[in-house]
Amino acid sequence: MRIALFAPVEPRKSGIASYTAALLPWMARRHRIDLFTDETPERSHVPRGSARVVSAHDIVWRHARDPYDLIVYQLGNSPAHNYMWPYLVRYAGLVVIHDGNLQAARGDYFLLRGDVEGYRAEFAYEDPRHAAAAELVIAGVSRTLRLQWPMLRAAVSTARTAAVHNPWLAARLRGRYPDAHIEVIRPGIDDPVSEDAGTARAMVRARHGLPPEAVVFGAFGWVTREKRVPQILRAMAGLADKEQSAHLLLVGSAVDHYDVRADLRAVGLEDRVTVAGYVDDADVARYLSATDVCLCLRWPTMRETSATWLRALAAGKATIITDLAHTQDVPVLSATAAWTRSAPEAHGGASPAPVAVAVDICDEGHVLPAAMSVLARDPDLRQRLGAAARAYWAANFRMEHLAEDYERVMSAAAARPTGSSAAPPHLDEDGGQRARDILKPFDVLPNFLRRDGSD
C-alpha cells in the first residue's frame, strides 16, 4: 500500500518520535511511505530508505492527485501533534492514539492562544450534555477536573479506525464512543540487551562515579512531577540512611515547570542522586544496563502504555510501577504489608510469575519507600522479577508483535468507509479559503480546493 504517515520525528525529543523511528523500517518492508511533518523536511531524521519526508501541507494536493491507500496518524497528548488535527478530521484514516486522554494538549492548544470559543466548541462536541463544564476549565478551577473529558471524540469519530495499545483502554473507548471503530495494536520494543551489557554497565557507572556494588534505582524519561519524581526523592531520602548502597539515577530531559535540583537540595540528596539529563535512544540501553531497579511511576495518568517500562521489561530489570486500571492484566506483586500477587482472575485463571511491583497511588507515601527498601536488600527478588519481566516482554511486546498488528489493522482500516461523523464544525476549515477567494473572480477552482469533493 501507499501510506501517508503523520508523526513527530527526530530531532524532536518525543517518545512517539522514537516509536516512529523504530516502526518505520518494519512498515517499509511492505509499504511505500510518505511521512508528513510540520518540521522542515530536510531537518527531519528517519531511518535511511524507510520513508520520503514531505511537508504536512502537501497532503492536500498529493492526496488529490494520487490518493493514498491509507493515511495513518500517530496522535499523542503533546503540542507535537497539533499540526495533525486539521488533516485527521478531514482525511479519514487510521488514528493510533498513544494517550487515552488528550485534554491537556487540546485545552492548551486553544486556551494558551486565547481561543476560548474554540475550546468551548470542542468541549461541547466532546460532551454536549455537560458543555457548561467548560467554563470551570476556562476559569482555571482545577487542572485535574478537566481530565474527566478526554477530548477524543473528534479523533475517533472521524477516523476509519482508531487504535490503542491496551485492551482496557479499547473497551473504555468503545463504551464512550459507541459509533467509533476501535482496534488494539500490541506495543513493541526492540531488544535492548546486547553482548556488551556488562561493559556498558561499568562504563555508565564509571562516567557518573557510581560504585560497582551500588544498588542503582533508575527513572527514565521526562523529569516531571507526573513521573512522581518528588515522591521518589522523598522515598530515597528515607532509604538513604538504611541502605548505604542505594543510589538514584535520573535519565531524561528537564522541564520548565519542575525544578528537580531544588527538590534535591531540599531533601539533602545531592550525593545520592545523579541527574544525567537527556541521552539519545542509542544510549538508553546502556543506562538501563547500569540500573538494578527501574521506577516507572505515573500520576495523573493519560492511560498511556509506557515505552520506558517496556524497555525495562525487555532489559530484564525489576520495576516498580503505579497500580493503574489499564494495567490490571499485568501480573504484579502488590506492595502492601503482605506483598500479595495479583489475583488469578485478572490473568484468565492462571497465576503467572509477577513481572513488577505495583504501588497503590493512595498509599504511595508509605508503600513506595518500603518497596524500594525491600528491592535494595533482596538481589534474589530483583533477579526473579527481572527474569519474569524479560520473558513477559518476549511473549507479548516484541517489535514483531507491533508490526504484525499494524499489518492487520492497516489492511482492515483501508477497506473501511470513512469515519462515522463528519468533521466537527469548529474544525471544518481546511485552510484553503483564502486561495478560493483569490481564484473566485477568475472562475477557476482546482479539484483539491473544492469543498464538495467534486471534479
Image (cartoon, rainbow, N blue to C red):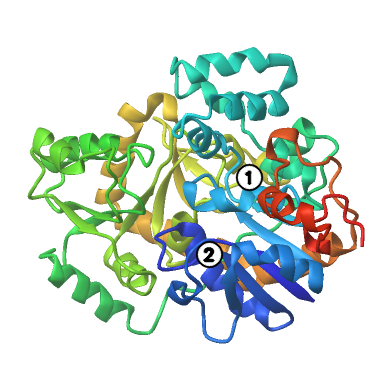
- Looking at the rendered image, the quarter that the N terminus falls into is bottom right
In the image, taking residue 33 as reference, residue 110 lies left or right, namely: left
Residue name at image x 72 percent, y 28 percent? 125
Q: Which residue lies under the disc numbered 1?
A: 329
Q: Position of residue 260 (x, y in %)?
A: 20, 42
Dot 2 or dot 1: first in sequence order is 2
- Looking at the rendered image, the quarter that the C terminus falls into is bottom right
Front in this rendered view, residue 125 or 153: 125
Q: Position of residue 283 (x, y in %)?
A: 32, 72
Label 2, secondary structure: give it. helix
In the image, taking residue 56 as reference, residue 312 lies left or right, namely: left
Mark 1 residue crowding within 10 angstroms, few (<14) / some (14–19) / many (20+): some
Instruction: State the CA–CA distance, disc 2 to disc 1.
Output: 23 Å
Front in this rendered view, residue 53 or 233: 53
Q: State whether residue 92 appears in this view.
A: no
Q: Which residue lies under the disc numbered 2?
A: 19
Residue name at image x 17 percent, y 35 percent? 238
Q: Position of residue 26 (x, y in %)?
A: 64, 78
Q: State whether residue 16 appears in this view.
A: yes
Kind of residue sitting beneath label 2 = Tyr
From the viewer's perspective, is residue 251 above or below residue 191? above
